[in-house]
């Protein structure tokens, strides 16, 4: 299975964008925790602490993160399905290697997808299939 340059670009974006989102979400979560700890250590009354935390993280902000998390989860699932289909349809991978890649995609997710992206998607040439057909044609005409 060969992919065009634009398909490789979109697959790469779908692979790395959820990772970047996860890092950003972790940073914002720890920022939320640090805001709560810093506000509490100032010795303010509990109402002031709640106002500062809720002011920094409004309901609209929380709703945005929930909706964007759902969207990125769907994108990650679609990318996982694309990687599994690509591994199954790729001709120059043995059956045991296919099983290994599918298990890597399922159990370690992003790490397996990034490794597969650089090993099989970026390294595959669009001329791969015609060369195989040409070599098979030469063998059949010679014999």
Image (cartoon, rainbow, N blue to C red):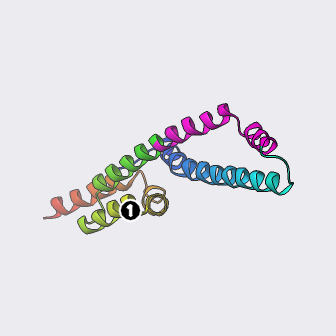
Q: Which of 52/87 is in front? A: 52
Q: As drawn, which residue projects farthest toward the top?
A: 60
Q: Which of 63/134 is in front? A: 63
**The C terminus is located in which quarter?**
bottom left
Relative to residue 95, is residue 85 drawn left or right?
right
Q: Residue at x 75, y 51 (%)?
A: 36
Relative to residue 66, is residue 38 drawn left or right?
right
Q: Is residue 74 above or below residue 24?
A: above
Q: Residues within 10 Å of mark 1 (few under 14, many from 20)?
A: few
Q: Is residue 72 above or below residue 84?
A: above
Q: Which of 5/9 is in front? A: 9
Q: Which region of the structure is painted magenta?
A: 47-73
Q: Position of residue 133 (x, y in %)?
A: 26, 54
Relative to residue 47, is residue 129 drawn left or right?
left
Q: As drawn, which residue projects farthest toward the left?
A: 143
Q: Position of residue 72 (x, y in %)?
A: 52, 42
Q: Position of residue 34 (x, y in %)?
A: 75, 55
Secondary structure at badge 1 equals helix
Instruction: Say which quarter of the image contains residue 64.
Output: top right
Q: Residue at x 69, y 49 (%)?
A: 28
Q: What secondary structure prevails in the magenta region?
A: helix
Q: Which residue is mark 1?
A: 107
Q: Is residue 64 magenta?
A: yes
- Total of numbered circles in the picture? 1
């Amino acid at each position: 299975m060969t992919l065009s340059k634009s398909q490789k670009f979109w697959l790469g974006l779908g692979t790395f964008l959820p990772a970047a989102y996860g890092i950003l979400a972790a940073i914002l979560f720890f920022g939320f925790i640090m805001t709560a700890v810093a506000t509490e250590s100032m010795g303010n009354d509990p109402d002031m602490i709640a106002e500062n935390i809720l002011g920094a993280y409004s309901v609209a902000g929380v709703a945005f993160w929930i909706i964007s998390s759902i969207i990125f989860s769907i994108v990650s699932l679609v990318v996982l399905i694309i990687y599994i289909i690509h591994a199954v349809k790729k001709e120059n991978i043995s059956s045991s290697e296919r099983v290994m890649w599918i298990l890597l995609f399922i159990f370690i997710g992003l790490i397996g997808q990034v490794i597969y992206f650089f090993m099989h998607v970026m390294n595959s040439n669009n001329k791969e299939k015609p060369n195989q057909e040409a070599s098979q044609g030469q063998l059949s005409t010679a014999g």
